[in-house]
Structures are given as structure tokens and as C-alpha cells.
Image: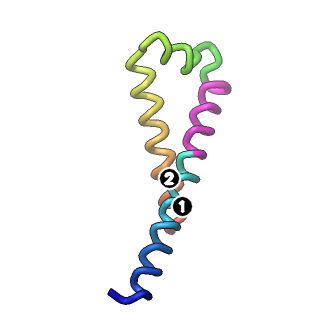
């Protein structure tokens, strides 16, 4: 294995890690925005503490789709 291949692989790994972190941050911020602005009468954090599975599924699906959008935005 040549050192050029290893350097390129580590560089791509670093870029993908940065994409992942940025997508996660944007997804969490989008979830908080939806929680505060669009659904002011429902607190996701409070419902999650109560063990509401529907809120957990909604929050995770919202974060997943925001991450997909951010990822395609970076690659396109």
C-alpha cells in the first residue's frame, strides 16, 4: 500500500467526518427550531422524558431527513 493511497483515504475520512458533524448540528438545530416555533404547545424534551415513543420517532425522522438534505447539499 502506497503512502499516497493512505493519505487520500485519511483525507476522505476526515471530510466525511466533518460532513457528519455538520449534518448532525444542523439537524439538532432544525429539531429545536421546529420544537420552539412550529409546535410551541408541545415540548419534545418534556415528552421524551415522559417516554413518548411517537415524539422520539418524529424527532429522529426529522433529524435523519435534515441530515440527508445537508449531505446532498454538500456533495452537489
* Quarter of the image where the N terminus is located: bottom left
Asked whether, in this view, residue 9 is left or right of residue 38, the answer is: left
The image quadrant that residue 38 belongs to is top right
Asked whether, in this view, residue 30 is left or right of residue 11, the answer is: right
Secondary element at tag 1: helix
> For the point 50% across and 54% down, which residue is it?
20
Q: Position of residue 59 (x, y in %)?
A: 47, 30
Which one is nearer the viewer's eye here, 76 or 43?
A: 43
The image quadrant that residue 3 belongs to is bottom left
In the rendered image, the residue lying farthest to the left is 1
Disc 1 + disc 2, Cβ < 8 Å: yes
> Dot 1 corresponds to which residue?
73
Which one is nearer the viewer's eye here, 26 or 38?
A: 26
Q: Which residues are magenta?
A: 25-38
Q: Is residue 9 above or below residue 22?
A: below
> For the point 56% across and 20% down, which residue is it?
45
> For the point 42% across and 36% down, which residue is it?
61
Asked if residue 28 lies in the magenta stretch, the reply is: yes
Magenta stretch, main secondary structure class: helix
Q: Callout 2: few (<14), some (14-19), or many (20+) C-alpha neighbours within 10 Å? A: few
Q: Position of residue 68 (x, y in %)?
A: 45, 52
> Dot 2 corresponds to which residue?
69
Asked if residue 17 lies in the magenta stretch, the reply is: no
Tag shown at residue 50: none
> For the point 49% across and 58% down, which residue is it?
71
Q: Is residue 68 above or below residue 72?
A: above
Q: Is residue 47 above or below residue 6?
A: above
Amino acid at each position: 500500500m502506497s503512502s499516497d493511497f493512505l493519505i487520500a483515504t485519511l483525507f476522505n475520512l476526515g471530510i466525511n467526518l466533518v460532513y457528519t458533524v455538520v449534518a448532525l448540528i444542523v439537524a439538532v438545530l432544525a429539531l429545536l427550531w421546529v420544537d420552539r416555533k412550529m409546535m410551541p404547545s408541545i415540548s419534545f424534551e418534556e415528552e421524551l422524558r415522559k417516554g413518548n415513543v411517537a415524539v422520539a420517532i418524529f424527532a429522529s425522522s426529522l433529524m435523519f431527513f435534515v441530515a440527508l438534505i445537508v449531505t446532498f447539499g454538500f456533495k452537489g
